[in-house]
Structures are given as C-alpha cells and as structure tokens.
Image (tube, rainbow, N blue to C red):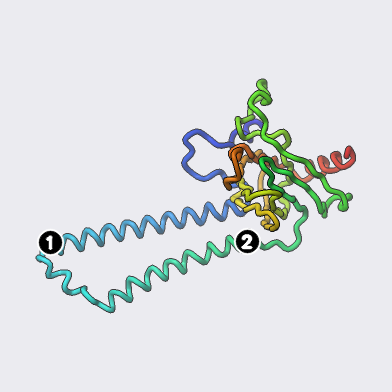
Amino acid sequence: MIFTTQCDSPALWQTYLSDPASITMEGILIFNKHLLFLLTVIVLFIGWLLFYTLHYFIEYNNKFSSKFVHSKELEIVWTSIPALILLILSTPSFTLLYAMDEISEPELTLKILGHQWFWSYEISEFNSCQKQEQSLKYVCYMMALDGLPTTKQGYFRLLETNKRVILPTNTHLRLLVSAADVLHSWTVPSFGLKVDACPGRLNQVNLFIKRIGVFFGQCSEICGVNHGFMPIVIVSLPTVQFHHYIMTKLELS
C-alpha cells in the first residue's frame, strides 16, 4: 500500500497529468493526447504558411499578396476550416461531459459538503449491502505537521487528513456535492473530477474507480484564508473489503 500511495501522490517537478484511476480520467487523457497531436499539426501548418507568405512577399516585391486581397474564396476557406476543426473537437468533449453527469443506477452514494475549512462526508444507499437504510458520516480535517506519523512512509505534508474516505473499486458511484457556507470545489486529479460546491445547490457527478490506491486532492476554489488547507484523501479498496469495512463501521456506530 505504501508503494501505491507514493505512485498516486504529487511528485516534484511533475509536468504531466496524473495516472488515470477512473474511466473519466482515462477519457480525458486520451482526448488530451489527440488534442495535442491536432494542435501540433495546426501550429506547424500555420508556421509554414507564414514563412511561405513572407518569403514570396519579399521575393516578388508585394505582387504575391495582390492575388489574395479581398478574396471571397479564401475568406470562406479560412472560416469553414476552423469551424470544422471545432466541430470535430466538440464531439468527444461533449461525450465526456455527458458521461460524467449521466448515471442511471448507482450502487453507492457519497454526499460531500464543503465547509470553512474542512470536508464532511456521508456514505449512503448501499444497494449491494444488507443495511441500505443506514449511512456512515464523518468529518475530515487536515492533519497538522506535528500530527503526522514520523515512523511511517506514505504521509504527505498539507495533504493528509485525520480520516480517509474509503470507496470501492469497479463500482458505479454517485457523488453529490454542495457547500455549507461559501463556494468550494472538490477536486481529485487522478479521477479527473473537479466539482463545484455551491451553497444551496446540489451538483452531481458519477465515478467509477478502476484500481486500488490512495488518491489526493484539494479544494480548487478560493474560499478564505485557509483555502490551501482543505486536502482530500480517497482510499479505494476491492469491493469485498469495502463491504466488510462498511458492515464493521455500521455495527460499531
């Protein structure tokens, strides 16, 4: 578990996206790679076009540009091509947005409430457990530096909480996000999720975790003086172990 924790934590001089741990993040990563390839082709083409135009403009003493001044055909081309490119890019983008929002029959619901400056959670609607009418509630604060274990690895400054959120893998989850005071934003990069927490409003997103691990996040909306001290820690377990954990917690509560 220590090795898994370090793999999914932020790294020094990290310049690329986190390793995907959900279907949503995998889709974002694939879309990003295709988008970067397309942008590279566009930049190279525009660079070649500028060089070609400047070269012939200088060589033919401004006679080259006279063929293209007030050209209706050229205006149609350079308007229709960008529109077509945007249309091509919008298709996978809207597909990802729809997939993040739409969920039919979630097996578990995680309710998230943002506060100044901590997160509270409630796990309910255990469709695959026996005690469906009960719920598990807890509050997560950032652990101070002097409270971090000094004899164990895998704990990170400003990212560790007093309690970790336990979620199952290979399970359709529904996340309901809101706030109790001001605007917050619940963000976990490895899941590809950034959900605004607005007072008086309930935002929904779905989550399907594909592998076990420990995943970190933070509040991504400036919410006051301690905005930078609202970490998020998610632990994903196999479904059988998660059910055992839930049943044990409900029996003790």
Q: Quadrant of the C terminus?
A: top right
Q: Is residue 64 left or right of residue 130?
A: left
Q: With respect to residue 18, does 83 lie above or below?
A: below
The mark that comes first in sequence, 2 or 1, is: 1
The circle on residue 128 is none
Asked whether the viewer can see residue 61, the reply is yes
Circles 2 and 1 in contact, beta carbons < 8 Å: no
Q: The residue under label 2 is which amino acid type? A: Ala
Q: Residues within 10 Å of mark 2 (few under 14, many from 20)?
A: some
Circle number at residue 58: 1
Instruction: Tell me: 10 left or right of 211.
Output: left
The location of residue 80, given as percent across then percent down, is 37, 73
Q: Residue furthest bottom?
A: 72
Pinpoint residue 128: horizontal percent, then vertical percent. 83, 52
Q: Where the N terminus falls, by quadrant? A: top right
Q: Is residue 8 visible?
A: no
Residue pictured at 63% horizontal, 29% vertical: 154
In the image, residue 43 above or below residue 244:
below
- Which element carries disc 1, helix, strand or loop? helix
| Label 1 crowd (10 A; few <14 / some 14-19 / many >=20) | few
Query: Between 41 and 180, which is closer to the camera in this rendering?
Result: 180
Residue found at x 56% / y 55%: 27
32 vs 75: above or below: above
Q: Which of the 4 quarters of the picture holds residue 63?
A: bottom left
The amino acid marked with disc number 1 is Ile
x then y, percent, for residue 237: 73, 41
Secondary structure, mark 2, is helix
Residue at the disc numbered 2: 99
Horizontal side of 86 relative to 190 (left or right) equals left
